Image (spheres, rainbow, N blue to C red):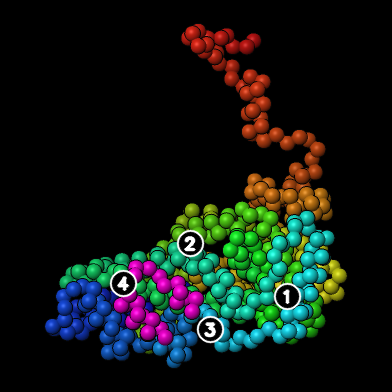
Amino acid sequence: MFATGAPLCAEAMPKHSLADCPAASVVAMPEDSAHDPEDEFREMLSQFLSGNGEIDPARLASAAGLPNDPEMIKNLIGQLQSAMQSSDDGINWTLALDQSKALAAKDARATTPAERSSLEQAFHVAALWLDEATSLSELPGEPKLLSRTEWITATMPIWTQLAEPVALSIANSLTQVLRDQAPEEMSGMIEGAEKLMRNVGGTLFAMQLGQVVGQLASEVVSGGDIGIPLMASAQGEQQAAILPQNIAEFGAGLDIDQNEIQLYLAVRELAHARLFRHAKWLGLQLMSAITEYAQGIRVDTEALENLAADFDPSNPEELRQAMVDGSLIPPKSEAQLAALGRLETVLALIEGWVDVVTAEATTRLPRSSAVAETVRRRRASGGPAESAFSTLVGLELRPRRLREAAAMWQAVTDAVGTDARDELWSHPDLVPTSDDIDDPASLVARMTSTAPVIDEFDRAMEDLLNDVGDDRPRERQDGSADEPPV
């Protein structure tokens, strides 16, 4: 996860901290080189990237989570050299898009006319079945059949939105470590090269993001597979989408008719899309919780310094493991824990509702329970969602409360029917809480109670209109006071 810039520090300084190395041994600088700090730092990195320094490009790629592919390593070095010459100060997210599309294109194949026809028919039937299982209205647009590269293009804006807070935090932490560790005679050089360092670190992060999204493109079967609203039209309308190639691979070896698998997954995808279209506030709330969590991520600079000091360049896996196991991230703050709790609850409510609705809509499928169990196992074992979030924002999303949330939705459905159940998604204040997941009976009791429900605002208005609630004397305009009521 933290491949943004740490490899440069660690690989460049094997077995020593920066503070332990004299400036001359850190980088062999030409005696007649310019004294501009940024030019000096650029020269240092140029020597590394040209192979004249101690850094090994293959090890850098490995530590960054990239495969040991000569073509990819060549691309990595080229992109880093380009970043060194860039005058921009930020992360080149276009690089992530290009990287992921190149990776996804390697094993991609075109959808056959037979597959397209079968999936279009599956969506048509799924919409009819779903009308019987939920009161949420159907989508205005036709569902899309996407290739892997098309899915990447459609979803990359969301991935960059989620990854940017982490990328910036890591880049800032890295420059701070370099500033703190550098000998005094190098402080001017480091300080003058911060923008350059952020560009190089941002390039590594963007390439890693591209690697992750490219891998996800070969795993996800639909737009809602991740659990967050990745698919939306230019007008902001939620869209349904399926990846035919991945659905075919999902069903391989399951001994279940492919038509059943297509129908089941089409129902799930339409249910996801209908929910986010109906509850337009839901996507914003979900993304806000994720962003709030990500913005609180900080890198443990002391751990990063220790890693740089003790790093063994012959074992790059040590560095990579430190980047992905979370050891460089301090314990979660109180704000992060609160955001994480809200996020887990909302995701559990969404997935639990989709599970219940899908199960009801697919009762005509003989093997629907077998497909459902495959989906649950795939999700529980750490599917696409966990891989993406843990790599990009250090956020592991396990469906810890999914079964409890599904049981709650089923209890509500049995007690009040689909219309009243789905009405709970009409406003954020009506959505069940974590306490409701723990105690579905109380939620059902509230929903089935015949007693009028008066909230605090209504009660205050009633007291005001009835002139009740304040026994203190009220002052007249002339300054005298009324006597309190007897």
Q: Are marks 3 and 2 in contact (CB under 8 Å)?
A: no
- Residue 467 screen position, x and y as percent: 63, 19
Residue type pointed to by label 4: Ser
Q: Residues within 10 Å of mark 3 (few under 14, many from 20)?
A: many
The quadrant holding residue 273 is: bottom right
Magenta stretch: give its range. Answer: 75-98
Q: Residue at x 50, y 59 (%)?
A: 291
Residue position for label 1: 374
Q: Are marks 3 and 1 in contact (CB under 8 Å)?
A: no
Residue type pointed to by label 1: Thr
- Residue 3 screen position, x and y as percent: 42, 76
Q: Are marks 4 and 1 in contact (CB under 8 Å)?
A: no
Q: Residues within 10 Å of mark 1 (few under 14, many from 20)?
A: some
Residue position for label 2: 294
The quadrant holding residue 231 is: bottom right
| Real-space CA distance between mark 3 and mark 2, rounded to the nearest whole angstrom | 26 Å
Residue type pointed to by label 2: Ala
Residue position for label 3: 103
The quadrant holding residue 143 is: bottom right
Secondary structure under badge 1?
helix
Q: Earlier in the sequence, mark 4 or mark 2?
A: 4
Residue position for label 4: 87
Secondary structure under badge 2?
helix
